[in-house]
Amino acid sequence: MNKINSKITDLLGIQYPIIQGGMAWVAEYHLAAAVSNAGGLGIIGAASAPADVVRTQIREAKKLTDKPFGVNVMLLNPNAAQVAQVVVEEGVKVVTTGAGSPEKYMELWKAAGIKVIPVVASVALAKRMERIGADAVIAEGMESGGHIGSLTTMCLVPQVVDAVSIPVIAAGGICDGRGLAASMMLGASAVQMGTRFIVAHESIVHDNYKEKVIAARDIDSEITGAGTGHPIRCLRNQMTREYVKMEQSGASFEELEYLTLGSLRKAVMEGDVINGSLMAGQIAGLVKKKQSSSEIIQEIMNQALNLLG
Ligand SMILES: Cc1cc2nc3c(=O)[nH]c(=O)nc-3n(C[C@H](O)[C@H](O)[C@H](O)COP(=O)(O)O)c2cc1C
């Protein structure tokens, strides 16, 4: 198949400009390795996992693929400093970061030759990341699943593209070749997708959760946590209703964060779609079937190449 060569495929040494987002609980080594084997970049989501769990995940991924893969370091994680060290020790090639600025780990990672790609939700943060030496940024719009900012992908991506000279990866609301082609038109060099990969065959997500994503309509996601300054997008269910109630009764950020992360585990591992947190983006309405990561990537590439002529 033809390729879309971009600054990101060159930078990361991957075949296709498609990155699977580091997702708490969801993005473990089976999915990451499958996406990398399919020519994209798979990412292990370290989320709030202890450093030794992340080390095991990396070692398992290496058994399944000899292609590059990444680790997403969630900077709010109390174990972030140890995880930052583990990615160096294990020779991980790419680190993406969420929930803040990775400034204090930059020297360590750059010395180890790691490509550092922070997720940003504003032009100001993108510029700051470029200044501290980021290799690229992921501009993520509020359409996406999980923790979100306030700008849409359509508005954020071209503004970030104009503001920085490092490559920009578009994320949020992208799940097919139209989304990839449109992102390239906005000046992005690749896309990151989360929601579509939830339903990949290699994703360990419980079938009940996958079915909810497949059944979701465009209007079925909801934002919880806007009041804490840490909004999260997930599919509407009993958990989101309880969350809103807790929020209104003045629960702390930690209690609410615990509720969502704990509930995400419940949804992913136990298939509890009532009390679990079904993090997913607005694009869930377009996700219609379970497929292998390789089929997903091939389908997107074919469609994008046709559109881009
Ligand atoms: C279940 C789920 C968990 C996520 N967890 C994380 C995370 O731990 N760290 C992070 O940087 N992004 C996280 N994200 C965001 C994804 O990496 C990705 O950027 C996003 O899903 C892209 O938007 P889309 O869902 O519209 O494809 C998560 C997304 C989902 C759906």
Image (tube, rainbow, N blue to C red):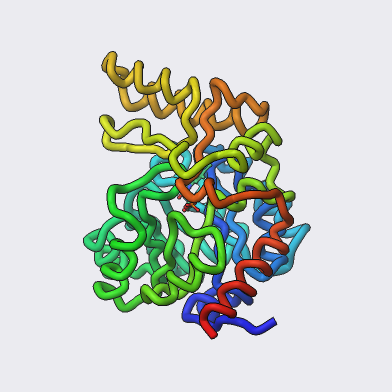
Using the image, determine if residue 17 lies above or below residue 2.
above
Horizontal placement of 66 versus 138: left or right? Answer: right
Using the image, determine if residue 144 lies above or below residue 35.
above
Percent of width and height locating residue 12? 55, 74
Residue that appears at 77% across and 58% down: 63
Residue that appears at 32% across and 37% down: 230
Q: Quadrant of the N terminus?
A: bottom right
Horizontal placement of 60 versus 73: left or right? Answer: right
Q: Nearer the viewer, residue 276 or 74?
A: 276
Percent of width and height locating residue 215? 60, 39
Percent of width and height locating residue 20? 57, 58
Residue that appears at 72% across and 63% down: 294
Using the image, determine if residue 7 lies above or below residue 117.
below
Q: Residue furthest left?
A: 124
Q: Residue furthest right?
A: 63
Is residue 52 visible in the rendered structure shown here? no
